Amino acid sequence: MVADLYPSRIGDKASILRRQDDVIHKNSNVTGGPLSKEELARYEENGYLLFQNLFSKEDIDVLQQELKQVLNENKGKQSDDVILEPDSDEVRSVFEIHKNSEFFKRLSKNKKLVSIAQQLLGSQVYITQSRINFKPGFKGKEFYWHSDFETWHVEDGMPNMRAVSCSIILTDNHEFNGPLMLIPGSHKWYVSCPGATPDHNYKQSLKKQELGVPDHESLKWLVDQADGQIDRATGPAGSVLFFECNIMHGSSGNISPFSRSNVFFVFNSIENKLVEPFSGGKPRPEFLANRTNIKPIEPIDEAIANTKVLMGSK
C-alpha cells in the first residue's frame, strides 16, 4: 500500500503541511531540455512559467479555428465529459480533448510542450487529463482557489507532486475577463482541507468546487508568504503557461464581453502513475484521470499549422 504523504478531507479542520517532493525532478533518465537555469530557478521558486507568443500567428489562427469547432460540436450536448455552466447552458469545460480530437491529440505531443514537461518532471510523461475551459463573456463563472494536486491525490490516487499543467491561451487573456490567478510560492505548502468526499463528487465539483478548497485563514497565510502578491496569467493568444500541480490558483467570473478560453494538458511523470484514491472511494472516471493504455508520449516536432496538412485538411 502506498503511503499517504498528503492526507486531506479527514477531519473538520484545515492544516498546512510542508511539501515533501522536489519541484524540479533531477534524478531522471531525461537529460537536458529547452529551459535555461534561470527559468528552472524561477519555476522552482514561483511554481509557474509563462511564455508569451510561443506560437506563430499562423498557429494561433489554426488553434482558434479548432476551438470554434469544438465549441460548436458540444453546444447543448448532454455528456459526462462536457460540463455546462451552473446557471446556464453555456459550455464550461470539455474533457479528454486529446482523445476525442485528432488535432488536439497531435498538439498534446508537440515537442515544444512535451520537452518542457519532461525537463520539469525528470522523466518521460503521459497525459493524465486534458480539457478546454471556456469562460464565455458575461456568463463564465469563477473557478475558486484550489490546488489541483489535492483533488488528484484524494480522488484519483496521484501519489506524489510530480505533474505539471500546460495551459495554452486560445483567446487573449486580459486582466478583466477572468484570467488564471496564482499565489507564487504556494506550491511549497500543502493545504489539508476539511470535510469528506462523497461518491460521485466530481459531478458537482466540475460545475462549482466546494470540497478540497482552502479555508480563508490558509489562503491568507499563503498570500502573506508571497508578500501579498497574487499573479495573473495574462497574455495574447498563443501564450503558454506551465504551472506546478500543487500551486494554489483560481479565477474570477467573466463579466466582460470577451470570452477566455484555454486548452489544458496535464503531464504526469510515467513514474507517478495513479493508485487507489486516498479518500478510500472509487476512482473518478477515465476522462478525469487516465489509468489505461498509459504510454510515454513520443513528441512530434512540427508547427501547429502543419498538422492541418498532415491530417489531410486544408
Image: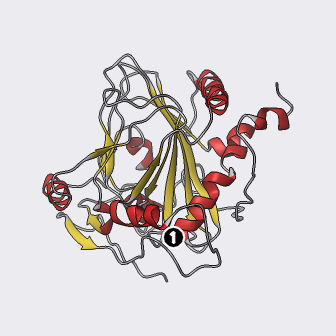
- Place residue 45 in its image quadrant: bottom left
Q: Is residue 133 visible in this depiction of the protein? A: no
Q: Residues within 10 Å of mark 1 (few under 14, many from 20)?
A: some
Q: Is residue 26 above or below residue 46?
A: below
Instruction: Answer with left or right where residue 295 lies relative to residue 277.
Output: right
The image's colour scheme reads secondary structure
Question: Considering only vertical position in the picture, is 65 above or below 227?
Answer: above
Residue visible at 41% across and 55% down? Answer: 48
Mark 1, residue position: 276
In front here: 56 or 65? 56
Q: Position of residue 10 (x, y in %)?
A: 27, 68
- Circle 1 SS class: loop
Image point (66%, 33%), residue name: 59
Residue 234 in percent (x, y) is at 39, 37
Label 1 sits on what residue type?
Glu
Residue beneath the point at 41% across and 61% down: 43
Q: Name, please, the residue furthest toward the top.
A: 257
User: In which image quadrant can residue 232 be found?
Assistant: top left
Query: Residue 299: percent from the left, percent from the top?
Result: 72, 57
The outermost residue toward the right is 312
Q: Is residue 267 left or right of residue 37?
A: right
Q: Position of residue 81 (x, y in %)?
A: 56, 40
